[in-house]
Amino acid sequence: MWIFDPGSERILEANAAAGALYGFSPEEFRSLKLADLLGEQESHRFMVEMRNPARPASSVWRQRTSSGRAIDVEMAIHEIDFLGRKARLAVLMDITGRRQLEDQLRQAQKMEAVGMLAGGVAHDFNNLLTIITGYSQLIANSLLPGDPNRQSAEQIMKAGERAAALTRQLLAFSRRQVLQPRILELNQLVHSLAAMLQRLIGEDVDLRLELRPELGRVSADPGQLEQVLMNLTVNARDAMPKGGALTIETANVDLDENYASRHIGVRPGPFVLLAVSDTGVGMDEATRMRLFEPFFTTKGSGKGTGLGLSTVFGIVKQSGGSVEVYSEPGRGTSVKVYLPRIDQAAITEPEQARRKTRRGTETILLVEDDEMVRTLVRETLARDGYGVLEASDPIEAREVAAGYTGQIHLLITDVIMPKVSGRALAEQMAHIRPDMKVLYMSGYTDSAVVATGILQKEVAFLQKPFTPAALAEKVRDVLEGNGKTRQAGE
């Protein structure tokens, strides 16, 4: 609380709580005027409102503390007698933290809405890309090396691959991509990328690694974390056109209740920090607020898609973590990624040599509701020697399987289909064909797909868009037992 004279606009008295909030002693308060707390323009507007008989009981005002920090206060004004003269009593409540949480919530809701749109677009687009890249590869493979049409088909394939990369970024932002998490050591991942990152940033930027020993482990998709690190490194490089220093840091941290209460969606507990800091141009608050929006970029035309940081945001959020950005104009930027810390040993997987895909003779039941994708997959499998039974939905698939007397070696099914999901279909089919293996495919995975436990149960999965070669290789992996697959009923 503080008391002021409405005539001179001077502060007459303040209590201890006001002193703690603003950082002024009682003597300093008595030497201040309203303009010292609200600024000249705001103090004038404040006094105009004070003379309005219909003014609200309380209102919110932006004010300044002794250090210059801006605070938002909810203020109610009362007329009182103070030492024999008319005065005003201001009763204040600091709502700065509440306003910040409200801003975070609005931003989170906007990001969620944009993410749903982006994920839906990517889902439909991936079906189209599967058809475009698939048939262009089939055409290219059927032409002789000197045929001019072969080069045209290869250009279509390259354009399809670029479009597929764009949709992967959209799926990452919308948190609807399929992650394949492993127990990782972040220090090891950073060390393995260090040489490539140095080439990426150039000789005029000094790369510094500050990796704490005995770092906790995280559960994440290594390929996606590499994408996070590369995107952050590229952004830092672009913020230092005249050179500078880029620091990559790791550490064990504990986020407490106080931190979690000030950040939407953050839970307290043990985390591993991955921070990428630069000495570049920095950014203002307005830019920071929009930093993770897809297609928002401060770079010039043709120099960025605006999907780099939105991809980082999606990958980290889908991995159970959070991202914080600290930056001021002219003082550089620090992006801090927090991933949940776990107490499990890291998993290392041996590299498998890529082999030439063999032809097959097995019988495959194909279930896909998109007719063009179904046709492409059927033709690809038939060219490789497989017998193909096809169905446009799970109900038809059950009828086809019931009417076929021979062995069905593999079920290939889309994950998301009307009425019955691919997972439910596989579980139903397991009762009548327990030896049949399953390969799932999808261009889109929302929370319903994640809830089915596809990745947790280590079933085989093929992400759309895929090429005929990738399909053929994956089919052989599953049939030969190398595709991390279980039978449908397990």
Image (cartoon, rainbow, N blue to C red):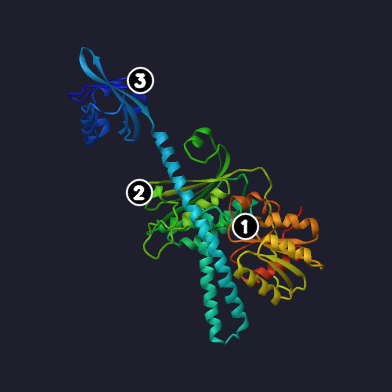
The alpha-carbon separation of the residues under discs 2 and 3 comes to 35 Å
Give the residue displayed 77% in from the left and 73% down from the top.
361
* Residue placed under numbered mark 1 in the picture: 418
* SS at mark 3 in the image: helix
Tell me the tag on residue 329: 2
The alpha-carbon separation of the residues under discs 3 and 1 comes to 65 Å
Q: Earlier in the sequence, mark 2 or mark 3?
A: 3
Rendering coords of residue 29 (x, y %): 27, 24
Give the residue displayed 36% in from the left and 62% down from the top.
300
> Looking at the image, is mark 3 or mark 1 nearer the viewer?
1
197 or 91, which is in the foreground? 91
Residue type beneath disc 1: Pro
Tell me the quarter of the image containing the N terminus. top left
Q: Earlier in the sequence, mark 3 or mark 1?
A: 3
Q: Would you place residue 262 above or below residue 278 in this image?
A: above
| Residue at the outermost left position | 7
Tell me the tag on residue 16: 3
Q: Is residue 215 left or right of residue 358?
A: left
Give the residue displayed 74% in from the left and 55% down from the top.
428
Residue 429, quarter of the rendered image: bottom right
Rendering coords of residue 221 (x, y %): 61, 54
Rendering coords of residue 109 (x, y %): 46, 45
